[in-house]
């Protein structure tokens, strides 16, 4: 079983659509959780940290379910500029921020 | 504020040659990380420096890889001798406060290494 597993994608959606990404992680002792965004041939950039209480940032909502070891990202009212690969990232270590990445899910938003 | 920089952006070498990648973290960031993405796979952790000390090098694939961070500023990652399977994108990241597990890591643009 992969340490961090994501929907393989790609997701093709029209502008304005709502899209949800799912992610599961294997280590129940994982400490912190993130969604990173990576544009083609660019570096990953932090999109959102994901907290147990869930959090929202504009059109983006992240949820964490520790019991199910499951993380989600919801994007509402998709924009063309949201087209990118979304990486589910987990810090599985206590004390150190060594990140474990999922393979990523590509999103393509079309006009 | 300048971000994480990496040099070179691309490197094409032949099997058996040596390559040295450089990373300059954000000024003041004590934590420096190396990651690698090989084609078709996820980004994987290689190692972590705190200042000039190696905190965790559990992700280093083998002894052909040598990372250094003399003086606790920039870091180099040397591959000697390079093999075909070393091809990929090598990312460097830095962060400020290790005490917070939610501390953001800022990534550099990566070095794309091709071994022929």
Image (cartoon, rainbow, N blue to C red):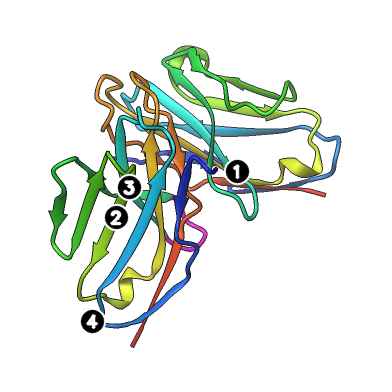
Q: Residue furthest front?
A: A67
Do the numbered discs 3 and 1 sit on residues whose CB atoms are within 8 Å? no
Q: Which residue is mark 4?
A: A16
Do the numbered discs 2 and 4 sit on residues whose CB atoms are within 8 Å? no
Q: Please name which of the two marks, 3 or 2, marks the residue nearer to the observer.
A: 3
Quick check: do tags 2 and 1 share a chain? no
The residue marked by circle 2 belongs to what chain? A
Which label was assigned to residue B8? 1
Q: Cα distance, mark 2 to mark 4?
A: 19 Å
Which label was assigned to residue A70? 3
Do the numbered discs 3 and 2 sit on residues whose CB atoms are within 8 Å? yes
Which residues fall within the magenta stretch? A39-43
Quick check: do tags 3 and 2 share a chain? yes
Above-or-below relation of B6 to A39: above
The residue marked by circle 1 belongs to what chain? B
Q: Please name which of the two marks, 2 or 1, marks the residue nearer to the observer.
A: 2
Above-or-below relation of A13 to B48: below
Q: Cα distance, mark 3 to mark 2?
A: 7 Å
The residue marked by circle 3 belongs to what chain? A
Q: Which residue is mark 2?
A: A72
């Amino acid at each position: 079983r992969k340490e961090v597993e994501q929907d393989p994608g790609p997701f093709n959606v029209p502008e304005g659509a709502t899209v949800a990404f799912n992610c599961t992680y294997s280590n129940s002792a994982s400490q912190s959780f993130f969604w990173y965004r990576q544009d083609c041939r660019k570096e990953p950039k932090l999109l959102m940290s994901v907290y147990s209480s869930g959090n929202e940032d504009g059109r983006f909502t992240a949820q964490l379910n520790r019991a199910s070891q499951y993380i989600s990202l919801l994007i509402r009212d998709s924009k063309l500029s949201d087209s990118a690969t979304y990486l589910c990232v987990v810090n599985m270590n206590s004390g150190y921020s060594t990140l474990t990445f999922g393979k990523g899910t590509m999103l393509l938003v079309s006009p | 504020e300048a971000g994480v920089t990496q040099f070179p952006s691309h490197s094409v070498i032949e099997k058996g040659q040596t390559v040295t990648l450089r990373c300059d973290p954000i000024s003041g960031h004590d934590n420096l990380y190396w990651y690698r993405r090989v084609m078709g796979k996820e980004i994987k952790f290689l190692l972590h420096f705190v200042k000039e000390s190696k905190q965790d090098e559990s992700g280093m694939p083998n002894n052909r890889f040598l990372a250094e961070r003399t003086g606790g500023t920039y870091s180099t990652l040397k591959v000697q001798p390079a093999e075909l399977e070393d091809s990929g994108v090598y990312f460097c990241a830095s962060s400020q406060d290790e005490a917070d597990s939610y501390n953001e890591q800022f990534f550099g643009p990566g070095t794309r290494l091709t071994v022929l």
